[in-house]
Image (cartoon, rainbow, N blue to C red):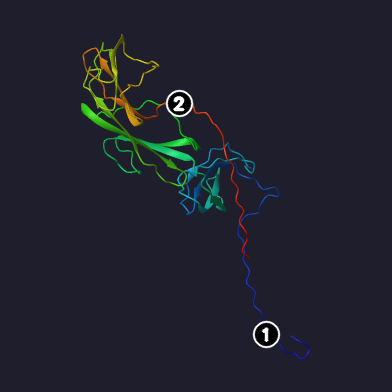
Amino acid sequence: MDSTGKWSMTNIKRFYVDQDPDYPLVPVVAQLVEAEYFFDQLQPFGSGTPIILNPASDISNLSLSLNTASFCGDGLHRLYIRTKDATGKWSMTNTDSFEIVSTGNITAYQYFFDQDPGTQLPGNGALVQIASPDSVLAINTSIQIPIGLSQGFHTFFTRTKNDACIWSIPERQSFYLMPLQAGLNIDQYQYFFDADPGFGIAGNGAVVAVNPDSIYSNTLNINLPNTLSDGFHQLFVRTRSSDGVWSIAERQSFYQLAPQQAMNINGYQFFSMWIRDSA
C-alpha cells in the first residue's frame, strides 16, 4: 500500500514445505553393493548384465571389460550403467555413446552334423564364442559325436563368423560311424592317385602293412607314377583295421609339373621407344 492508501496488484509465489526430519551435518553414504550395464534400450531394474564389484561407497576407479559380441557390423550404440546401494535403492542410469568398428576378426564358430540348423541354433553341434577374436582361427579340440547318429556315413560341417556378423561357407568332411570294438588296430594303409583301384589293390599306388596299433602316424615320401600327366591330380589315402574294415579315403589335390631342362641364354636384344606428345 502506498502513501495514498492504494494497494498494489497481488504477486503470487509458490513454495514447498519439506516435512522430512533434520539431516545430519555429515550425510551417511550407503555402500554400493550391485551394478549392472546394458546397451541401446532401457531395461527394468535388475535385468541388465551384472557387474562384479566389492561393496564400496566410491567405485569411480572401477575398470570394466564389456561384452560387445552381440553387435553386428559397424555402428553407433549407447551404454547404460547404474548401481544399487545397501538400502536397495538404485542410482540414476548413466549413459554414454560409443562406436563399433569391425576388424574382420573371427568371433565365433559353429559345427553340426548332416543337416544345417541355421546360424542361430546349435542343432546337433554347437555355437562357440571365441574369447580372443583374431583374423585366423586355429584350434585343436575334441568334438562329441551326437548320441542320435546312427551307424553309417555322415557329414561333419563347420563354419566361422567375423565381427561384422558374416558367416563363412561351411567346410564339410565325410566320415563313417560304427560301434567301437575293443582290440581293433590299424594294420594296413593304402594310397593311390585319381582313380580308386578297390580296397587292398595297389593300382597306381601301394598297399603297405604296418605294425598294428590303435593310432598310426607317419611321414612318407611317395613316388609319383610315371603315368601321371602334367596338371591337377588327387592323392587318396585310407587305412584298414584288423577286422578287415577300410576307412574312408582322405584326399589331397596337387598340381604336377614335369621338371624343365636347363636353358642357356645365348644373347639378348634391347628395344626402346619414344612417344612424342602431340600437344
Q: Position of residue 226 (x, y in %)?
A: 33, 22
Q: Quick one: label 2, few (<14), some, or many (20+) residues within 10 Å?
A: few
Q: Position of residue 13 (x, y in %)?
A: 65, 74
Which residue occupies the foreground of this view, 226 or 136?
A: 226
The type of residue carrying mark 2 is: Gln
Picture layout, residue 117 above or below residue 216: below
Label placed on residue 22 = none
Residue 65 picture quarter: top right
Q: Nearer the viewer, mark 1 or mark 2?
A: 2
Residue 237 picture quarter: top left
Q: Is residue 218 left or right of residue 177?
A: right
Q: Secondary structure at mark 1?
A: loop
Q: Earlier in the sequence, mark 1 or mark 2?
A: 1
Q: Which residue is mark 2?
A: 261
Q: Is residue 40 left or right of residue 248?
A: right
Q: Which residue is at a point 33% across and 38% down the rendered structure image?
A: 122
The type of residue carrying mark 1 is: Met
Q: Which residue is at a point 46% across and 36% down the rendered structure image?
A: 130
Q: Position of residue 93 (x, y in %)?
A: 55, 52
Q: Quick one: label 1, few (<14), some, or many (20+) residues within 10 Å?
A: few
Q: How many marks?
A: 2
Label placed on residue 9 = 1
Give the farthest residue toward the bottom. 4
Give the farthest residue toward the top. 211
Residue 236 picture quarter: top left
Which residue occupies the foreground of this view, 118 or 277?
A: 277
Q: Answer whether residue 92 is visible to the viewer in this image.
A: no
Q: Secondary structure at mark 2?
A: loop
Q: Is residue 135 left or right of residue 175?
A: right
Picture layout, residue 25 above or below residue 254: below
Picture layout, residue 185 above or below residue 161: above
Q: Position of residue 172 (x, y in %)?
A: 32, 34
